Amino acid sequence: MHADFDAFYASVEQRDFPELSDRPVAVGGSPSKRGVVASASYEARKYGIKSAMPMSTAVRKCSDVVVVSPRFSVYREVSRQVMEVFRDITPLVEPLSLDEAYLDVTDVIQQNVTPPQIAKKLKESISSDLGLTISIGVSTSKSVSKIASGINKPDGLTVVRPGDEISFLHPLPIEVVWGIGPKSSEKLHNLSINTVGDLSAQPIKVLSDIFGSNAMYIKNIANGVDLRPVITQRERKSISSETTLLVDTSDRGDLTEIVMRLSGQVADSLIQKDIRGRTVKLKLKRSNFTTLTRQKTLLEKVQISSEITESALELLNYELKNSDEKYRLIGVGVSGFSSAESLHDEMQLRFEGL
Ligand code: TTP
Ligand code: MG
């Protein structure tokens, strides 16, 4: 199953401030500060207001829109709660972001309990425990479930039965496939490739020109072939936290503050899972959408916020010294948890300590 909150930030605001329910709400940065929309309520979407749109455009589209500043700590808490509700059903939960996750319910299915029933019960629990609606897709694979959860929003439940994957996927527009952004979608439309079915029928050569080494992955997805397992946090190779800024910035003070906040979030997660990592990574996406990552491998593993912040800021300062770009996304991550190699290194260090 793939589960995703409907208009996540906006719905939390409507839940907590009932005077906003039924109103067009846009959560995000202020229109006067060149802010963007992070989440639009379904009432606001009727006016064409969408995520990532400048807030000034949103106000132009609907002068009645209620602009709300985000309350990130509340969204994080709701996210923690929903992941707990998911884990009451199965330990095999793979969060993709604050508001969405894959759940592998294979082992939960019994003779009298079908996957659609599990999904229905989950929607009811979330509605009664959290006062929010979620959309769920159910199928035999991650990609089909993710697409299915997106097509009947809000409050949707879409089940694609085994064997129906192709008939479900092929009439859909290519944009439903994760990894097909505006650029590749334009190229595909120019070649009259408009539906997932059209995509699935292309020779691999055509797809390679557009998707490079991801061509086979895309072709398989278009054919409903996706064998990726659900990976729980415990098995993760890295733990990271990233944020898209409401306004692009090159301000060192702002960037430092964000890196500190993200390092704190990563530390919370490491402490919660009782793991430490040796490599600290900084990810930056520039205004022009190019992404760079810098990483630093340490002698000793880190876990607490100050240790991660120190390395992440070192990487940030190195980057800022060499560039005066504006940035639109920042991420901090820690990896290198317990490979045989690092375990070996750790033993060495311990022996040296003795
Ligand atoms: P989404 O699940 O993409 O959007 P949504 O939950 O608001 O709406 P829906 O799923 O019903 O289409 O993203 C989840 C949250 O992530 C969203 O509420 C706010 C945040 N977000 C941003 O901050 N910027 C963005 O550009 C996007 C797409 C999301
Ligand atoms: Mg959502």
Image (tube, rainbow, N blue to C red):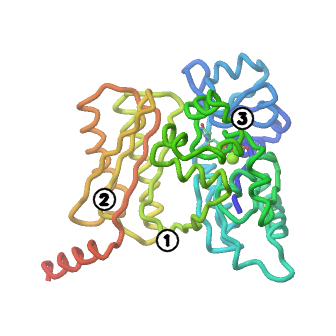
Compared to residue 332, the image places residue 250 above or below, namely above
**Are circles 1 and 3 on residues that touch, CB within 8 Å?**
no
Mark 1 sits on what residue? 234
184 sits to left or right of 336: right
Q: Amino acid at mark 1?
A: Arg
Q: Amino acid at mark 2?
A: Thr
- In the rendered image, residue 95, in percent from the top left (x then y), is placed at 59, 59
Indicate which disc, 2 or 1, sits on the residue closer to the N terminus: 1
* Rendered residue at 65%/48% (across/down): 200
**Are circles 2 and 3 on residues that touch, CB within 8 Å?**
no
Q: Secondary structure at mark 2?
A: strand
Snapshot quadrant of residue 252: top left
* Rendered residue at 80%/82% (across/down): 110
Mark 2 sits on what residue? 279
Mark 3 sits on what residue? 40
**What separation in Å lies between label 2 and label 1 (alpha carbons)?**
17 Å
Does the beta carbon at disc 1 come under 8 Å from ligand 1?
no
